[in-house]
Each structure stands twice: as C-alpha cells, then as structure tokens.
Image: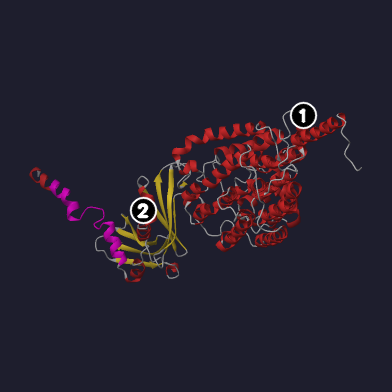
Amino acid sequence: MTRFLPVVVLLVLLLPVLGFAPGSQTDAREAERTASLVPELAGFADRPTVEPSAEYDLNRDVWRVALVERASGSTVGRVEVVDDTRETRNVEVSPEAETLVYPELSEADAIKVATALPEVRRELLEHPPYTTHAEYAEGEWTVHFEVEEKGSIGGLPLGDTGRKEISRVGIDDATWQPTYVWTGDQVGWHMARGDYGAYGKQANYWYVWGTLALFFAAAFWRTDKLLSLRNLDVVALLGFLVSHNFFREGDSFWAVVLWYPPLLYLFGRTLLMGLGYGERVEKTSNLPTAVLFVLAALASGFVLALNLDSRVIDVGYAGVVGADRILDGTLPYGNMPSDVGTGDTYGPLNYLIYVPFNLIFGFSGQWDFLPAAHGATVFAFVVGAAALLIAGWRYAGPKGAAALFFAWAVFPYTLYSTNNNTNDVIVAAIMAIGLATATLPVGRGAAIAAGFATKLFPLVLAPLWLLHDGVGKRGRILDFVLGGVGVVLLSFWVLALDGDPIGAAKLFYEKTLAFQGERETPWTIFTQMPQLAPLQGPLEFGAIILAFVVAVFPRKRTVRRLAAFSAALIIAFQLTFNYWFYPYVIWFAPFVFLALLVETNTKTALDGSSEEKTLAKESDQDGSRGDLADGAEEPGPK
C-alpha cells in the first residue's frame, strides 16, 4: 500500500484543479455578467448607473447578484447564479424598478465631462493631485474636486480633514452640459459666484446703477475745467463700479484688486485736504438748487420703492434675530441660529435699533422677507438724508443742503446698501448725524459712541473728534465724554441680560473685535496676493498712529477738515481689513460728500475755524479801541 501513497496525495492535491474541492468555480465578474443577461433584468442592467454586485454563498454554492442603481442607492433586481452551471434562478424585480428615475450619465461620465471644462482644468493645474466624486439628484450631477490642502482661501475646507474642495461642477444629466462651474473661492463663498442680483438685486442692473452714476456725474462734474481735482474726485467715487463689474462676473481676484485704486486715491485726497492741501472747493454743483432738491426727492422715492422688492442678506437678518433675542431677554452674543452663526459680530445698539421694527412688523423666526429689516433700512435712509440736508444747510446754506441730499440719494452705493438691507446704511446715517452736530462736543461724542455700539469701526475717529476743539478745551472734552458715555450706557446694558455682565463682556469681545481680527476671507488683497501679507500688520499699526497724529495736527480745525480726516481714517483702516465689501463705501460717503463736493465757505464752521473767528473778533475790538484812542471819530451817522 505504501507504494500507492504518493499517488493518493497527488490526487488530493489535484482535487481543486479538477473541480471537486469546495469553493466557487466561477468568479464574481462572470456571475455579474451572467445576471445582466437575464431577460427580466437586462433592460435595467443597461442603465449607466445600474451596477451588479455579486456575493458567493459557500453553503449553497450559488452567487447572489444584486443590481443597484448607484445614484439613489436602490436595488432594482436580484438573481441567483449557480456556481457550477451558471444557471440562473429566483429572479426578483424590485417594485420601484419601473418608477425609478435613471440618469442618462454614469458617475464616471459626469466626472469626465466636468474635468474637460477649461475652467476646471486651469484650477486643477494650480493644485496637487486631486480626487473626484459625484452625486446625482433631480436631473443633475454634482461633481466635486478635492485636494490635500489647508486654509479657507481658494476653496471650501472639508472640516478638520486637511482637505479642501477646489472645484464643483453641475452637469445636466439630459444634455450633458454644465449648469454651473465653481472654482477656487466660488466653492466656499456664495458671494464670489457672480450670481447676478443675489446681492443688491435691481441695484446690479446696468440701467439702474448707470443712470444713478450719470446723474451724479452730471451734477458734480466740472465741464469748465476738465483737468481738475473735482473731476478726479468724481471718477474715484464712481470708480468702484469697475471693480464691481468683475464681482458680478464672479472674478474675485480682479474685483478685489480693482477696488484698491479708488480707495487709495480717496485716502490720499482726504488726508491731504485735512492737512490743508487742496481744500478749496470752487463750485458745489452745475445744477440749480431747486433742481437738486427735486432730483434728490425723486431719487429717494426710487430708492425706497426698490427696497420693497429687495432681499435681506445675512447682516440684516442678524439684526432682526438679535432684536428678537433682546425682546426675549436673551443675550444676542452666542445665541444666533445656525443659518447666521456669525451674526453676533456687531455692537448691541445694532440689535436695539431693530427692536421697534420687530415690534411693529413682527418676526416669523425664519429668514423670509423680514419686513422689520426693510423698515430699519428705510428709517436709516431717511435719517441719513435728513442729517446731511441739515449739515449742508448749517455749513453751506440751501445749495449745500441740496447737494448733500442729492449726493446721498443718487450715489449708486447708497442704493446698493439699502437694497441689501445691511446695517451699513444705519452706521452711515449715524455718521451723517455726527456731521450735522459736529460743532457740538456732546453730539460728536454721542455719534462716535453710537457708531461704535453699532458697527465698531467709528472708534477710530474718537481721538480726532474728541480733540476737534483743541487739546486745552477741557470743558468741551468733558462734554464729548458725557455724550459718549450716555450712549454707551443706553446701549451696552444688553450685556447684563443673562445676569453675567463680565462674562458677556468677554463674549462680546470674542464675537466682535477678536473675530474680525482673525477672520480669513478672499476679500482682501492680502489673501489674493499673499506676498503682500507681511505688510498688513505694519499698515494696521500705521493707521492707529495716524488716528492720533491727525487728532492734534494741524492746529487749524474746521468741519471740512474734520470730515476729510474722518474719511481718511476710515479708508485707512478699510485698506487693512480682512474683509471688505461694496456697502462699506457708504461708511465714509457722508464725510467725502461734505469735504469734496461743497463749495468753500469761510463764513461758517465749514471752513472758518472757531479760533480764527475769535481772533478776528478780538482784532476788530482792539482796532476800534485804538482808533478812538487816537481821536478818531466813532463811526455812525452824522
């Protein structure tokens, strides 16, 4: 027997080859192919997104094959394939197989179409190796391109994974055509996508902003002196429209780069004017006073009418939500809903301003039409117009009043702000009130405090406005402080709502000043051109130093210089911001309008300083006494 043992061992080893060992004789791919040929399932198997999946049942020696529609994850059919004979049995067709919507494209096809797009290919060339995946919903494929890369600039960070989505493409399943193509910042930032009308709605239509710009230029353009500072001023004020066109097209790089030239010009122009260079304004407007008033009234009606059909962006929504929290006795900070999670980055007065409008119009708790936000915007627009009208009348008479009222109503970025229903028009109105009361220290202090309690940035004007009447005027400095403290007390009581004012103050700082300082966005030249990033810190420091320098130098103080320096300081800080947006133009607009557009008038506080008036008065009195002492006749009728 021993001589047959090697033969027996050899036969045992050959059993798997000869097909007698337990296990599958057919591989998974052959089983899937066999299942796809079953007449009842063949029609479904031919669909691009239907894929077979085979699993071997060792006990029964059969392959269980399921046909799955990958886009929906639904199983459309099942069948068993006998391993040895490849016979099929137990064929099942899912009840939903006939009603299911089957895409015309497969996931792989959708990815191929998206990858072939020039915009996507350009974006992929700028990044390391990428991965893709796609999902199908309602007749459209969404294709995602992801890379191993950190940071929120140039894409959408995917949590804490260290990955970022750098491109997203929608592919119409029926036509194989792209419905949208987002690359870079467009993926993570809705406002970078160039959705026409998404921000500002009708304010984006060329025949709307173009008409307003034309009227603005017609009123203030020097036709008699083309090469004049006035005309450069008008070009700069309307120059933001060039950048804005790229923003509407979804080109964030050029949009950012091109809003700096007008900002830099206006900064230099107003700073020099505050120092006394180029401060003489020869002419207010080409149009008669009555015409300016009529056009301003018509433009105001137009702006307010468009607001009825405008949308409220997140800033206005946050104002309404914050007011609702206050009415409920809850601190707004740290208690914002998820759809406006960073809406608590403003001062408490911002939310208090919305309270009466919430009481009048109510709040549904949803981000809907938000009539309270519209009401606050309309109120702020009217207050701003009235304040500038009063300021113009006080400092330059009827013509100045008409010019400032007209500029406010016709300037394209007033409409852009109101049509977004942001709080930018609110803080601009507060600044306009500050201009109207600029000769009153209490008014200046209250305006700066109110601006800070609304949108923080007016704090940079505090040294300038505090010392406007001179360093040694202690009584006026005290009046300024009293005005500011009064507004602070009327605003910041909100921090005591939760019973922990110290903790609330810390939370306020974290949500506002700290958040704004750490914010990373594509809306600054320091992220669009990273090589300039090292300059941001020194420039911020320089802006702070400038705020204190212009508070004491030069010695001559007029309302025009106050307005010019105020505009220069606001723009200086905007130049260093991590985030800038077109409604921010309206922050400094009231100051620029008064400084650059109103004719020189030394008879009022506009261009006549209080010190000069006092000296002139004393000189006249001394001269009169001297003449009489020399025996001169006292003037009067003989």
Kind of residue indicated by mark 1 = Arg
SS majority, magenta: helix
Q: Nearer the viewer, residue 250 or 225?
A: 225
User: Residue at the spot x=32%, y=71% of the render?
Assistant: 39
Instruction: Tell me the residue that label 2 is attached to.
Output: 121
Q: Which residue, as the protein is rendered here, is positioned at the far right?
A: 638
Whichever of callouts 1 and 2 sits on the residue coming sooner in the sequence is: 2
Locate residue 615: give its quadrant: top right
Q: Which mark is residue 474?
A: 1
Q: Amino acid at mark 2?
A: Arg
Name the side, left or right, on which 618 lies relative to 187.
right
Q: What is the magenta range?
A: 8-36
The reply, left or right, for residue 229 in relation to residue 49 is right
Q: Is residue 11 magenta?
A: yes
Q: Which of the pair 511/289 is nearer the observer?
A: 289
- State which quadrant residue 454 falls in: top right
Residue 160 visible at all? yes
Q: Residue at the location (34% across, 66% down)?
A: 45
Kindly tell me whether residue 311 is visible in this rendering: no
